[in-house]
Image (cartoon, grey):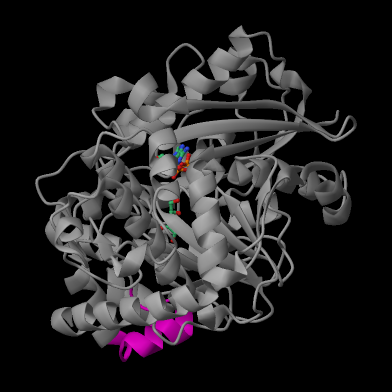
Amino acid sequence: MPYFLGLDSSTQSLSALVIDTDQKRVVLDQSVNFGRDLPAYGSPHGVLPNADPRVCHSDPLMWVEALDLLLSRVREQGFDWSQVAAISGAGQQHGSVFLNTPLSEVAPWSAARTLAAQVRPLLALPTSPMWMDSSTAAECEEIARAVGGRARVLELTGSGPIERFTGPQIRKIYKTQPDAYRNTREIHLVSSFMASLLAGTSAPIELGDGAGMNLLELKTGNWNQALLDATAPGLAEKLRTPQPSRAQVGSIAPYFVERYGFRAGTPIVAFSGDNPSSLVGMGAIAPGMRLISLGTSDTVFAAMDGPRTDPHGYGHVFGNPAGGFMSLICFTNGSLAREQVAQRFGLDWTAFAAAVAQTRPGNQGNLMLPFFTTETTPRLLEPGVELFGSPEFVAWQRPAEAVRAVLEAQALSMRRHSDWIGHAPRQLVLTGGASRNAAIQRVIADVFQTPVRLLQVANASALGGALRAAEAAGKLGWEELFASFVALDPNVQVEPDRTTSATYATLSRAFDEKLDQRLSRTS
Ligand code: ADP
Ligand code: XUL
């Protein structure tokens, strides 16, 4: 059987992508959008509203219901799930699900009831802290203090103590909802939760995604006892031993065989984080390629030959699902910030791109610090947008200049904060919802003075899941899989405009100065 399924449970949607390794083509690429398709969860962008902007949780039942909805929709369209030979996938990183019963101890899912109805009574906590949450500064400090400082956490785990990471989030639940923590017997990442649902048993956390918890020791690939102790009591028993990416974590639960027609015994390969999975989906498992994902957040990432860490302490080291490590730098104000500017002036994406064309590189010195929400890179726990330049621009009366300013600031920040990865990139490969926007491609190419390319398949994370399933099943090696499924889009080859180099060098200095002033005010 030549079909392999990759699932991606991301911030705003759940996607399914199926590859046919004989015909070398993608035969299915479909999504359920949480806001549009599951409005009852009151999460238009996949996140529950909260009076405190630093608190971001999601309803895990929304992810569960999305799985039923997506599988049934695709089946109703006539797709035969029994052709799928193996399944893997990915989840948004860092988010956690707290269960009062290990899934290995629950009765098999009943095909007579929905999955959400069966998972609801298992939740020790009704909501899941997710990656946009930045409310755990105190917990980060406490963990750092307990193990010997922020630098020690960075050295052990590849990341400093980070608010959105799972360890500090678990500590906050332990402190603020002690009963819920006490009732918790199993904690999952979104990735291991989705794999567990499919397998109908407890799937372990995978090493690539596990590195985003501030709990996993990179050197040993296992939980670090000092960090476990610093986070919450009895935590080791609530986490299973992390497993390598190629591990088969179970086979499909009878529920999915009966309801959707999957083949009994279909193997489930460990799910990873969406970023490690995208590394695979972009064919970038070896060092040398620099990737930029423009999703809800923006991320810059690359495979690494060793676990080098960010001297600024903003970036992260995760596991590379194909072996070794990857770097990742997350910019929370990605599409979030672009959308804010577009909405302010009532622009759709076409008008947004046209606005950039009405202005010149360097924006005549007009500059923005685009922190519409709290930021990960650089670490800013208070949001705040600042404008510098002409009085009209500063008064938000120049839509076109505001649009250019947000894009230039984002690209300048990415450049400044990704230097430490090393390997000066020969080209930048973009993915994610905003990557098709020609104005964004142009600004990135010019600010980095590096050619920009796009992949043909937009959903790199789900594709990465399908490729990982095929590789783990021993069907084909990475080289053959990449040759068949990972092609650069021949229609998008954006060469940098060399005449803008000096302009951006000047703007970059101005940006650094304003940003440094801001950082010194807040630190
Ligand atoms: P995620 O995987 O984080 O859910 P996606 O990669 O699907 O996110 O990207 C979704 C985002 O892409 C939307 O929030 C939207 O702001 C942005 N987007 C979609 N189309 C465009 C476009 N043409 N130009 C700029 N941004 C876009
Ligand atoms: C990475 C991060 C986000 C999420 C959501 O550290 O927080 O990229 O994985 O996509």
Q: Where is residue 389, by image quadrant?
A: bottom left
User: Who's the residue at 29% across and 36% down the image?
Assistant: 59
Could you tell me which quadrant the C terminus lies in?
Answer: bottom left
Provide residue 408's location: percent of width, then percent of height.
40, 62
In the rendered image, residue 150 lying in the magenta stretch gets the answer yes
Could you tell me which quadrant the N terminus lies in?
Answer: top right
Which residue occupies the extreme left position in the image?
A: 51
**Near-viewer residue (282 or 122):** 282
Provide residue 323's location: percent of width, then percent of height.
71, 67
User: Who's the residue at 60% across and 16% down the image?
Assistant: 74
Provide residue 486's location: percent of width, then percent of height.
76, 47
Q: Where is residue 174, by image quadrant?
A: bottom left
User: Who's the residue at 37% across and 77% down the image?
Assistant: 227
Q: Where is residue 304, by image quadrant?
A: bottom right
- Residue 427 vs 104, above or below: the answer is below
Q: Can residue 109 be seen in this view?
A: no
Whether residue 91 sits left or right of residue 351 in the image: it is: right
Q: Read off the magenta span.
A: 146-161
User: Who's the residue at 55% across and 58% down the image?
Assistant: 292
**Near-viewer residue (413 or 137):** 413
In the rendered image, residue 184 lying in the magenta stretch gets the answer no
Whether residue 523 sits left or right of residue 447 in the image: it is: left
Q: Is residue 330 visible?
A: yes
Which residue occupies the extreme bottom position in the image?
A: 148
Provide residue 440's location: percent of width, then percent of height.
49, 51
Regarding ligand 2, which quadrant of the image does it lie in?
bottom left
- Residue 430 vs 66, above or below: the answer is below
- Image label count: 0
